[in-house]
Image (tube, rainbow, N blue to C red):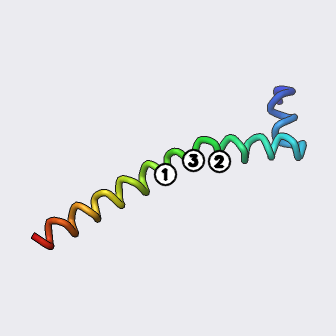
Amino acid sequence: MHPILREMLTEPVGWLTIIGALIILGLPLFTALFIRRKMRADARDERDRS
């Protein structure tokens, strides 16, 4: 196994790095999807009121 891969998978610091990367990549995606869903719901509510 490659030394960097072995370090990432066998050491706690490697797991923290993997989890940190997933959080850093996941937060903007979650935020974008949440805002899109909220804007769609607001537009639907506005359309239903008129």
Across and down, in percent, residue 7 comes to: 87, 35
Q: Is residue 11 left or right of residue 29?
A: right
Residue mark closest to the camera, 1 vs 2: 1
Q: Observer-nearest residue: 19 or 48?
A: 48
Q: Is residue 45 left or right of residue 23?
A: left
Q: Observer-nearest residue: 1 or 43?
A: 43
Q: Which mark is residue 23?
A: 2
What is the tally of numbered marks visible in this picture? 3
Up-down relation of residue 24 to residue 5 (above or below) = below
Give the secondary structure at mark 1. helix
Give the secondary structure at mark 3. helix
User: Where, by quadrant of the figure, is residue 17 drawn?
Assistant: top right
Residue type, label 3: Gly
Residue indicated by mark 1 = 31
- Contact between labelled residues 3 and 2, with CB atoms less than 8 Å apart: yes
Of mark 1 and mark 2, the one earlier in the sequence is: 2
Q: Is residue 1 left or right of residue 42?
A: right
Residue indicated by mark 3 = 26
- Separation of disc 1 and disc 3 at Cα? 9 Å
Q: Is residue 17 left or right of residue 43?
A: right
User: Where, by quadrant of the figure, is residue 21 drawn?
Assistant: top right
Which residue sits furthest right? Answer: 11
Q: Residue at x 31, y 57 (%)?
A: 39
